Each structure stands twice: as C-alpha cells, then as structure tokens.
Amino acid sequence: MIASCLTRHKWCTATVTLREGTGKVTIKALTVKSNVHDILYFTRIIHRDQLLYPFKVVDRVNLFDIDVNYDGVGFTAQAIATRLAISKALCSFISSKEVEYLRLAGLLTDDARRKERKQPGKRNARRKYKFRKR
C-alpha cells in the first residue's frame, strides 16, 4: 500500500510517498548537487527527530519507507513540511484512534504564518526608514 502527500511550510514544498517497508528514508532535494540522500541529509539531530516524530507517536518506527522530494530551501522549513506530510500520509495506514493521537500532538495542523507584506511608507513590512530631522 502506498500513500502520498504534498505540504508546504513558508517557501518550501515537500512531497512525501509512504510505503510499508523497513524504515528506509530517501531524500531528493533539487537545490543540492548530489541529488539522492538519506536521513543524514539533515545535519542537525532536531531536524531528523522532526521526520521520525509522527512514527514515534503511533509507535510505528521502522515500519515504513519514506521518499521525500523538496522544492525550496531551508533545512528547518523542509523538516517541518516533511513532518506534516508524513503525518497526513500516515493517516491512511493507521486507525482513527491513532489519527486522534496525531491530532492531539499537533501533527496534523499546518503552521498558518506567512510573510507580511511591505507597508507603504516603510522600508520593509515593519522596518521604518532612517529618521532624518532635516
């Protein structure tokens, strides 16, 4: 059985394909020269934990193979987008009680924050121009 999901976080898009297997992680990032990676693509442990956290919540570690495609940069944004996509794809493999565990852990909720637009009369969204008295 295969489940696929596409999610976004900030400017990053993650497409995840989940299938029953042995826990193999394959990452394809368009912005990196050597295209295919494993979980060691993320150098920080906190980012690796983000990928595996949905499996830990429902106690299904090393039971699924994960294929991830990224479009967009930023390791943290990629990890968060992947966590959301894995959680949504995992819902087709688990019971409704376990889906509720994911929801209570906040794994099925998207981060709705977006970039604020530039305001007129200001340099950026919030930054003002330098004050000149004369």
Image (cartoon, rainbow, N blue to C red):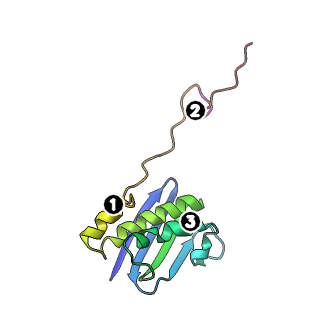
Residue 6 counted in the magenta span: no
Question: Nearer the observer, disc 1 or disc 2?
Answer: 1
Tag of residue 103? 1
Is any part of residue 101 visible from this angle? Answer: yes
Closer to us: 67 or 33: 67
Determine whether, in the image, residue 125 is placed left or right of residue 105: right
Tag of residue 113? none
Tell me the kind of residue under disc 2: Arg
Distance (Cα) linking label 1 and label 3: 20 Å
Q: Position of residue 59 (x, y in %)?
A: 39, 76
Task: Look at the image and give the residue range highlighted in magenta.
Answer: 122-126
Residue at x-position 36% and y-position 66%: 88
Residue at x-position 60% and y-position 68%: 45
Q: Decide which of tag 1 and tag 3 comes sooner along the chain.
A: 3
Query: Around disc 1, counting alpha carbons within 10 Å, would you say few (fewer than 14), some (14 to 19), or many (20 or more)?
Result: few
Residue 125 counted in the magenta span: yes
Question: Nearer the observer, disc 3 or disc 2?
Answer: 3
Q: Position of residue 37 (x, y in %)?
A: 59, 77
Circle 2 residue? 126
Residue at the far left in the pictured view: 96
Residue at the far bottom in the pictured view: 22
Residue at x-position 25% and y-position 69%: 96
Say which quarter of the image contains residue 64. Answer: bottom left
